[in-house]
Amino acid sequence: MTSSDPPLVAADADPSVVLDDLLATGHGDGLPVVPPTAGRLTAMLAGVRAPDAVLGLVPPLFGELTVGAVGWYAVLAGCRPVQLPVVVAACRAALDDAFNLLGIATTTGAPAVAVLVHGPVAARAGLTSGAGGLGTGNRANACAGRAVSLALAGIGGATAGLTDMATIGSPAKYTCCTAEVPGGPLPSLAVRRGFAADADAVTVVGAGSVVEVLPAEGYRDVPDVLAPAAAAMAGVALAAGDPRRARLGEQFLLMPPELAAYTAQRGWDTERIAGFLFERGSALLRSGAAGLVAADALGGLTVAASAADVHVVVTGGAGVKMLLLPGWMGGTRSVSAPVLPL
């Protein structure tokens, strides 16, 4: 699809008929959509300087990524125009070769494109970094993440059972987007990757799964908080069939502000946290992999490519439950990119 010829419907079109017609032509994810009328698309693209400029080619069928095309899917997803720059930035970031969108879009596995939003743009777009950011109830998070998934699949031609060969799939493929807590107790991921503290940015993660992690019962120090997360990292590596796959990848631990403050107050920065998770997780992995790989290969097993590839992101509301987003073991690297004016 190109931005010059998106299918548009009449303002009084029956939404159920629109949904059926769009799905029949390969547009949509199965959930209800906002009917893409000319008025809605015009409003979405208001002020966009070059809606038809080609920003890249989207695998697997290499359709042209344009702001106009992304805007059409943003209408379907229920986005407001203020969220469009975030959606476009995430789609562009996913085209980076290191992200391996071709593999993510066509695998028989179940990876999802997770989006982390950094900087003041999150508040402007209405995104929450608080309670339930990856769950229900926040329109901006849900719709922005859904728009990214819809646009990449629709423009790229990733169709379930034809080019998207996921054996079972994952609900995270519908939407997976949240914001990082601004000014949190630990430095933001964007700052650690070289962005200014007030810069607007996104990070796309090829998330292989979503794993809830709790601190050890009755935790009294930081290792008690982190040890279960290290075990979870080892567990997902073991679940990959060949635990050697993890040694090229990344791990993302989403940590709520309460726990981030707890660790920071005890002198643990992100580098120290990552180092602990990497070393403890890798030791557990080597222990658990005995019998799965040759004995002489155990020493090379790690839960990520390096400690620097274990990332802590502060997000969430009250409570101490964390969430692990392990990188897809088929091969992907996260990509951070600026959110640019359109």
Image (tube, grey):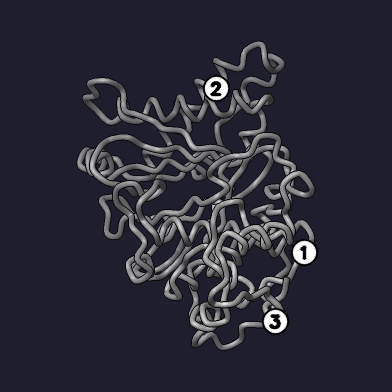
Label 2 to label 3, Cα distance in Å?
A: 51 Å
Q: Position of residue 255 (x, y in %)?
A: 34, 42
Badge 3 amino acid? Ser
Q: Is residue 80 left or right of residue 1?
A: left
Residue on which the image places disc 3:
4
Could you tell me which residue is drawn at 67 percent across and 43 percent down? 331
Quarter holding residue 49:
bottom right
Dot 2 or dot 3: first in sequence order is 3
Q: Secondary structure at mark 2?
A: helix
Q: Label 3: few (<14), some or many (≥20) within 10 Å?
A: few
Q: Is residue 57 left or right of residue 175?
A: right
Quadrant containing the N terminus in the rendered view? bottom right
Q: Label 2: few (<14), some or many (≥20) within 10 Å?
A: many
Dot 3 or dot 1: first in sequence order is 3
Dot 2 or dot 1: first in sequence order is 1
Q: Position of residue 200 (x, y in %)?
A: 42, 69
Q: Position of residue 220 (x, y in %)?
A: 21, 25
Quarter holding residue 3:
bottom right
Residue on which the image places disc 2:
285
Q: Secondary structure at mark 3?
A: loop
Label 2 to label 1, Cα distance in Å?
A: 38 Å
Badge 1 amino acid? Phe
Could you tell me which residue is drawn at 61 percent across and 43 percent down? 111
